[in-house]
Image (cartoon, rainbow, N blue to C red):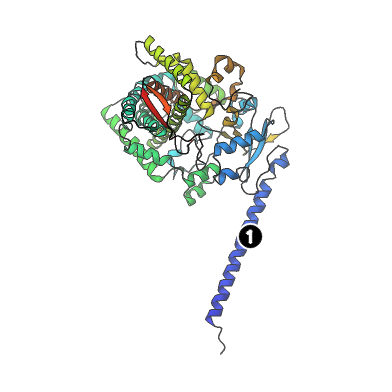
């Protein structure tokens, strides 16, 4: 009987398998190519000006390949769209409309907010419960919770938290004194991250973290984990609408699992301790506990600063059923949001502010003189009310937020077909809208010296001349950053405690010009910003 050699069978099997996998790969590639090319016809079909995309990367090739920071990528797109009020670009295969005109931005964020009330970020509550907060919620769930939390960030509540922030800032002087005595340059980001960690730990979680005194504290270590660059988190930036089942299947959670357990347990333990011992501190956690104990709160009677009244008028609802239950999980998510927003944003803002002051000593001296004069007029006592009597400091902070914005873009998702005013263009339901805050900040139409650090951009006269929606450091409309007052207070207190006692110079360790790290979506500087300080 004739037998086929086993070696011949094996080689044939290998060839069949190779051919099969080659066909599968080729078919998959051709399908992806066809799908992306089809997607890239969207703006042609709808008569919207756009940039010609790469067949796969869309208009973000250098960003996806980490050749450029995402901020640089969006800035280039903004410039290429001149002089259009709006135009289209592709994030890989996904069409997105960039709105460049401040008046049209006002329509999207405020006047026609009902069409653009969601940010379009998909989350999985099961695998990333800490992401289940105001920044990602949508629809009635977002409205109801926003109503509950509005009064938590009123001027009155900020005044309650002010002593806690001041107490954290008092550790700045001994820390900097040691750097001076040791003749050491210091990493500005590390120092200020430790300060903001202490502030958020105290005001949001009710714990004293002492990160300025102990750089290796557990709370500080967990903060570092949160902001470490992660491929999975970057994928979510490019695919904000990725289905929940894909998040679970591919493990694309925004934060590592241990982060959820750590912060949830802190909140659980602190709530238990306060309720059992009747402890109050006047912080954010106190306010959440009060809401928790009322379970279902009808429309809040307190309308500090008119915030709630303004919000209700903007969303167009006379009444929204406010039945969100303040569970431990909801409390943990919002304490965590407080941490993420307050930690990174405030530390970056103060870091870049100090960098610019070190580069511009005349501005540093002018600002310090304003601070010292205000303290002298107030018997050397720094009070909450004094923060409103520092106009030049406000100008310097605003200019810092212009050059180094907290968010380079604002994203919105169209909830129903919308006709752009004074045009025949229809923005279809489901399409993403991008507002280029960074691009506006560097546009000479709104800022005469965009590449310079020029606080006079925010003089009273220039602010009146400029369209209000050309500068959006915290967003605008009903989805404006709810914690803007706290963020500003944190920065003001930090800057005052830094400048009243020390002068800052740039260390040779700082690489100039500053270059942002391409692999991150934020303001991370290659080599860091290193400063030297000396007592005044």
User: To which residue does mark 1 refer?
Assistant: 27
Residue drawn 39% across the image and 35% down it? 332
Q: Is residue 326 visible?
A: no
Residue drawn 51% across the image and 46% down it? 244
Q: Quadrant of residue 470?
A: top right
Residue 22 drawn at (x, y percent): 60, 64
Q: Quadrant of residue 385?
A: top left
Residue drawn 58% across the image and 72% down it? 15
Left or right of 115? Residue 276 is left
Of all residues, the one furthest to the left in this rendering is 277
Residue 521 drawn at (x, y percent): 51, 39
Residue drawn 34% across the image and 13% down it? 380
Q: Looking at the picture, does residue 101 appear above or below residue 302?
A: below
Residue 94 drawn at (x, y percent): 62, 43
Of all residues, the one furthest to the bottom in this rendering is 1
Q: Is residue 457 visible?
A: yes
Residue 208 drawn at (x, y percent): 31, 30
Along the line of sight, the residue nearer the viewer: 86 or 389:
389
Quadrant in which the C terminus appears: top left
Quadrant in which the N terminus appears: bottom right
Element carrying mark 1: helix
Q: Circle 1: is it few (<14), some (14-19), or many (20+) Cα within 10 Å? A: few
Q: Looking at the picture, does residue 392 appear above or below residue 18?
A: above
Left or right of 261? Residue 241 is right
Q: How many marks?
A: 1
């Amino acid at each position: 009987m004739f037998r086929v050699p086993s070696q011949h069978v094996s080689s044939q099997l290998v060839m069949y398998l190779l051919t099969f996998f080659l066909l599968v790969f080729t078919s998959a590639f051709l399908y992806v190519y066809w799908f992306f090319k089809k997607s890239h016809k969207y703006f042609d079909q709808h008569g919207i000006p756009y940039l010609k995309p790469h067949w796969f990367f869309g208009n973000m090739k250098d960003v996806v390949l980490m050749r450029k920071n995402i901020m640089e990528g969006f800035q280039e797109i903004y410039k290429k769209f001149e002089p259009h009020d709006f135009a289209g670009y592709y994030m890989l295969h996904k069409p997105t409309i960039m709105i460049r005109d401040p008046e049209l931005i006002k329509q999207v964020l405020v006047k026609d907010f009902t069409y653009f009330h969601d940010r379009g970020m998909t989350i999985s509550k099961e695998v990333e419960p800490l992401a289940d907060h105001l920044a990602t919620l949508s629809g009635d769930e977002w409205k109801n919770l926003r109503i509950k939390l509005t009064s938590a960030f009123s001027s009155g509540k900020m005044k309650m938290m002010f002593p806690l922030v001041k107490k954290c800032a008092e550790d700045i002087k001994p820390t900097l004194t040691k750097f001076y005595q040791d003749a050491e340059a210091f990493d500005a980001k590390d120092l200020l991250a430790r300060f903001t960690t202490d502030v958020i730990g105290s005001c949001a979680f009710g714990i004293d973290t002492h990160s300025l005194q102990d750089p290796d504290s557990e709370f500080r270590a967990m903060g570092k984990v949160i902001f470490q660059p992660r491929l999975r988190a970057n994928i979510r930036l490019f695919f904000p609408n990725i289905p929940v089942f894909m998040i679970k299947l591919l493990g694309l959670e925004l934060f590592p699992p241990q982060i959820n357990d750590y912060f949830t347990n802190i909140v659980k333990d602190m709530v238990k301790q306060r309720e059992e011992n009747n402890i109050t501190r006047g912080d954010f956690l106190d306010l959440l506990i009060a809401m928790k104990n009322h379970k279902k709160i009808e429309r809040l009677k307190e309308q500090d600063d008119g915030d709630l009244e303004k919000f209700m008028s903007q969303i167009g609802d006379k009444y929204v059923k406010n039945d969100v239950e303040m569970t431990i999980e909801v409390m943990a998510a919002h304490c965590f949001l407080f941490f993420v927003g307050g930690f990174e944003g405030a530390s970056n803002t103060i870091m870049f502010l100090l960098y610019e002051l070190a580069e511009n000593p005349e501005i540093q001296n002018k600002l310090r003189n304003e601070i010292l004069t205000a303290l002298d007029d107030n018997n050397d006592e720094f009070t909450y009310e004094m923060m409103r009597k520092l106009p030049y400091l406000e100008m310097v902070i605003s200019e810092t937020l212009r050059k180094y914005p907290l968010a380079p873009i604002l994203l919105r998702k169209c909830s129903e077909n919308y006709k752009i005013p004074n045009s025949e263009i229809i923005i279809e339901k489901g399409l993403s809208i991008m507002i280029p805050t960074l691009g506006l900040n560097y546009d000479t139409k709104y800022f005469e010296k965009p590449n310079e650090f020029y606080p006079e951009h925010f003089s009273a006269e220039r602010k009146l001349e400029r369209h209000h929606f050309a500068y959006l450091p915290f967003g605008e409309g009903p989805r404006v950053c709810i914690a803007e007052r706290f963020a500003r207070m944190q920065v003001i207190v930090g800057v005052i405690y830094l400048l009243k006692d020390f002068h800052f110079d740039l260390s040779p360790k700082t690489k100039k010009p500053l270059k942002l790290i391409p692999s991150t979506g934020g303001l991370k500087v290659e080599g860091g910003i290193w400063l030297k300080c000396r007592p005044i």
